[in-house]
Amino acid sequence: MRDAEPSAIYLKDYQVPSHLIDKTHLHFILHPTKTRVSSDLTIRKNPDADTKSNELILHGQDIDLQSVSIDGRQLDDRDYQLEAECLRIANVPEQFVLSVVGLIAPADNTSLEGLYKSQSMYCTQCEAEGFRKITYFLDRPDVLSEFTTTVVADKTEFPVLLSNGNPIKSGSLDDNMHFVTWHDPFPKPAYLFALVGGDLECIQDSFTTTSGRAIDLKIYVEEKDLDKCDHAMASLKSSMRWDEDVYGREYDLDIFMIVAVDDFNMGAMENKGLNIFNTSCVLAKAETTTDAGFQRVEAVVAHEYFHNWSGNRVTCRDWFQLSLKEGFTVFRDAEFSADMGSRTVKRVEDAKLLRAMQFAEDAGPLAHPVQPASFIEISNFYTLTVYEKGAEVVRMIHTLLGAEAFRQGSDLYFERNDGKAATIEDFVSSMEEAGGRDLSKFMSWYHQAGTPKLAVTADYNSSSREYALTFNQTCPTTPECDSEDKKPYLIPVAMGLLGSNGPLSLVPETDVDFSLSKNDTHCVLELTQPQHRVVFKDINAPPVPSLMRGFSAPVRLQFDYSPDDLITLMTQDDDGFTRWDACQQLCVSVIHEVEASLQQGKEPSVDSRLSDAARALITNQNLDPAMVALMLTLPSEGYLAEIATTANIDTIHSAREIVRNHLAASLKTEFAERFDSLPYFPEYEANAVQIAVRSLKNCCLGYLVATADAVWLERAMTQYRTATNMTDQSAALSVLALSPDSKAVDYSVSALSEFYQQWQSEALVVNQWFSVQAMQPGEEAVDRIRSLMQHEAFNINNPNKVRALIGAFANNNPVCFHNSDGSGYRLLAEVVKKLNATNPQIAARMLGPLTKWRKYDSKRQELMQAELNSIKQTVGLSKDVFEVISKSLA
Ligand code: B3K
Ligand code: ZN
């Protein structure tokens, strides 16, 4: 908390550290309010630092300093200067051991950063700058140190004491205390430090690396959760094998541990050898976890494991390089998930997330480049841009180089930078070297914010039999750069042309670099200029262009497709992403037509070509059911708002409902037949085949309940009551609870109350119960949320609960959140003010929906700004919230 206005730090001001810390010895005596942390740091002056000063400045915050010594000589308070966020020691020798003792209070640490208590256990979260709340240190990622950590605690209360690396010593002490000493031979920055003390049980397994080393694998949880660890363990083993097979990366310590904690700000953390996970990303069991939950566990386990190389062995020089580890690791985990399940489904899901959420971030007041140039609070930069757009940028490098050269580039990057703190430029230069090409034109993707727009026009000349495409790229103005000052992007456009008999052979004539696939029907164009024209020869009739196959670049594509063109793409293209995208565009255009009629007070009608296309999809037994489900799912209200200039939430909602109800009514028989013909798997498995079937089945059920037919309401209720897995149970609960039809009310009330009765002892399941209610329609929504906040199961200090209730309301219930009386905004502002004092990171994150105020009508804009301004007046505003508010009001 601070009262002076926080200032920004800039990438351009980067300087190497003044000192290096070769070895770090830590000793903890755990206590809720007086944990004693003693550190012995072996420090030397950094030979690369060009400063003449002998001052050492260590980061430190909220530590009750007890003593400071240099080489065994205790300093008195004239020898050092203690400030709120640092300890300054003037005139330190060239080389010395600094010993510091401090007291900290983990039980009072509600920020969940540093050392804190989650229920009865002690745990840590140090990325990005949490280590400085534990002890005084050079808490920056380019200071790598070899850590030895001893943890002392009561033997009965905390039988398990963990830290990074390998255990080297343990034993009993007086007063029922015990200790364990851990040593991590790999030098690492402090953000990768971890410590856990608790009464935990574990499941164990082992993995033998390609070179024949046996690794112990352990997942620690509370005893009651031991039956929910198998999926995470299987995912861990698959990840370890995959990283060896695909990237040639072996694990390096003798032991790899995961610990599950209830109170955690994000999904998980890749601490060296000791990953700490939010329970939501590790626990999974058919009865309590949905298919999406299983997939998330697999993806997050893989993501954190992959960080062992992309993040830990090679770390970041400074936090402006965050995407170096996060973008690359998200790309790696996405490819892993694609290999484990359905590649096309994974690609569509990722593109959907990017287009609905990241594009909105890139178009809003908090837009920033993948490599930001400045920040006030780094915690605000763990964003969709750094993670997901960062992964797309790595994917484009993969596309441009091809799989083989990309792998050589990654080998070179790991080899050159192993044990070092690297930059995004180091990564790209390894790729350039392996690919034998200059990627300087590519760097706009890292340095410029905003989503480029790619407008494409076509003309066909029947006498020359030439088909020409003209590509125009622009990038909108973003907070730090005007549109006209932006450099062009190198955009890989994967494409083909569809003729009346399917894909055409491509004979491009152009100055654009391109590569053709083996059968010449697919090519990747490399656009580099604001405008390019590409001419295709020997084309007998105007084709339908299939553009941005596989979502080959994160751009907004604009091409004037007719509904019939879209239907051709949907049914005939051989790229799954483009088929899905064509279907989405058809849905969008139909919804837009309905919106226009509503706005003009006309009776809306739904283009019958959409229901015909949907009929063809439902009845097609040859398509992957998961793809059918994705194609039949209308674009979300969030996405429709994102693509609108001014989002009229109520009209968007009504138009989408009209289209949905129209499809439901006109295809009721087809939905019912498909629902009944899909198999039921009594033995649940979270594999691609089963997940696909359940997703289509529950998609059909959604449409069938939308008809409000008594038979289908009853059937949904039966599914709710008889389901043996959470996917089917929660899908039935949602369709009933979210139905706007009064005939569904009794079912909804019963199902919600039975659900809580059944699952009240499972915190993660109760979170689903909060979320469904947060998304329920109706005027009383805000009152419902307020009373749920008083519910015995709600706890504002638990980020999962805040996300489940408040996050789901503000992000996924747009009609109620944007109620024109401002009550939704007020509720969110109240919650943010409370969280500002206890957990600033979560407070800043929850603010997101209010920062998008420019998207709405003037009345709502005023209401939203008023709430932002009132938060801004809060006494003791955190840096986190200050940054988000001030940028969003600028
Ligand atoms: N690296 C962590 C995120 C840390 C967030 C700190 N506020 C998890 C991950 O991306 O793997
Ligand atoms: Zn990560």
Image (spheres, rainbow, N blue to C red):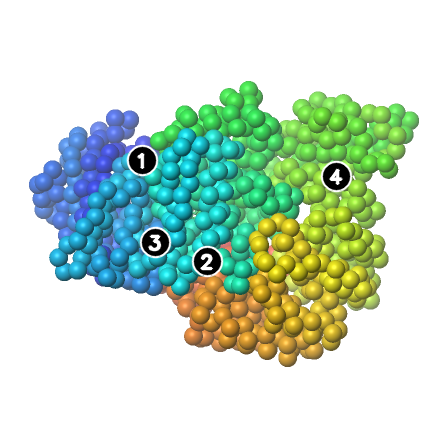
Per the image, the residue denoted by label 4 is 574
Front residue of 472 and 585: 585
Image side of residue 518 versus residue 193, left or right: right
Nearer mark to the viewer, of 2 and 4: 2
Q: CB at mark 1 closer than 8 A to ligand 1?
A: no
In the figure, 424 relative to 304: above or below? above
Q: Amino acid at mark 3?
A: Glu
For marks 3 and 4, give the CA distance: 48 Å
Neighbour tally class for label 4: few under 14, some 14-19, many 20 plus, Cα within 10 Å: some
Q: What is the spatial separation of the Cα atoms under label 2 and label 1, in whole angstroms? A: 31 Å
Q: Secondary structure at mark 4?
A: loop
SS of the residue at dot 1? Answer: strand
Residues packed near mark 3 inside 10 Å, few (<14), some (14 to 19) or many (20 plus): many
Residue at image x 70%, y 78%?
743
The CB of the residue at mark 2 lies under 8 Å from ligand 1: no
Q: Position of residue 175 (x, y in %)?
A: 14, 60
**Which residue matches tag 1?**
186
> From this viewpoint, is residue 615 visible?
yes
**How far separated are the C-alphas under marks 1 and 3?**
23 Å
Residue occupied by mark 3: 113
